[in-house]
Image (spheres, rainbow, N blue to C red):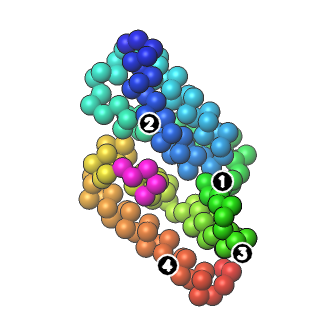
């Protein structure tokens, strides 16, 4: 496979790989490293990519596995929570602060979920994969994904309601 064909194949989902890595590793620098590592592994394996039915799902599975390996390593102790996905300069400052607090609350709640719940929320609600694609990436049945996603969303919803009803938890 030539370099241009490889880039045409990999570049469309490079940002999804990064976002998944960032969700799992939290650190932007670690996510960038994971993305580069994945692209390098795909490049080294470029001649065998034709055997995969869905290369994007294969790449996301590789990303998930790489991130879990990183989290298990000693480097995971140095990761910090940094959120920079939301910015809007046209909104009044009070509303910006409220929105950031809400987003931070959701991220904190998601971080308390199980690894599988975090992964499935990221893939379904943020990356917008369908259940069959998630099943291929995670390696469990679509029915189990629906149940896990439902439970994760319910936990997030209940924790947010609890926080808003009772103030700071």
Identify residue for label 2: 13
State which region is magenta.
125-129
The residue that label 4 is drawn on is 158
* Point 31% across, 61% down: residue: 146
Q: Is residue 14 magenta?
A: no
Residue 45 visible in image: no
As measured in the structure, the alpha-carbon distance from the residue carrying label 4 to the one carrying label 3 is 25 Å
User: Tag 2 or tag 1, which sits nearer the N-term?
Assistant: 2
* CA separation in Å, label 2 and label 4: 33 Å
Up the image or down, 83 lies above or below 156; here it is: above
- Quadrant placement of the N terminus: top left
- Reading the image, the residue beneath label 3 is 94
Nearest to N terminus: mark 4 or mark 1: 1
Task: Please tell me which residue lies in front, 139 or 33.
Answer: 33
Q: Earlier in the sequence, mark 3 or mark 2?
A: 2
Instruction: Say which residue label 1 marks.
Output: 84
Contact between marks 3 and 1 (CB within 8 A): the answer is: no
Secondary element at image label 1: loop
């Amino acid at each position: 496979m030539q370099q241009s064909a490889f880039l045409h194949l990999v570049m469309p989902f490079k940002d999804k790989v990064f976002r998944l890595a960032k969700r799992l590793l939290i650190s932007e620098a670690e996510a960038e490293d994971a993305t580069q590592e994945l692209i390098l592994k795909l490049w080294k394996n470029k001649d065998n990519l034709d055997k995969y039915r869905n290369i994007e799902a294969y790449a996301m599975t590789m990303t998930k596995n790489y991130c879990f390996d990183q989290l298990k390593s000693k480097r995971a102790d140095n990761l910090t929570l940094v959120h920079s996905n939301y910015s809007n300069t046209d909104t009044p400052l009070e509303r910006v602060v409220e929105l950031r607090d809400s987003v931070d609350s959701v991220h904190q709640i998601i971080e308390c979920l199980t690894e599988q719940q975090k992964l499935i929320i990221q893939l379904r609600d943020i990356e917008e994969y369908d259940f069959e694609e998630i099943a291929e990436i995670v390696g469990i049945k679509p029915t189990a994904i629906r149940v896990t996603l439902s439970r994760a969303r319910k936990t997030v919803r209940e924790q947010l309601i609890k926080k808003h009803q009772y103030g700071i938890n």
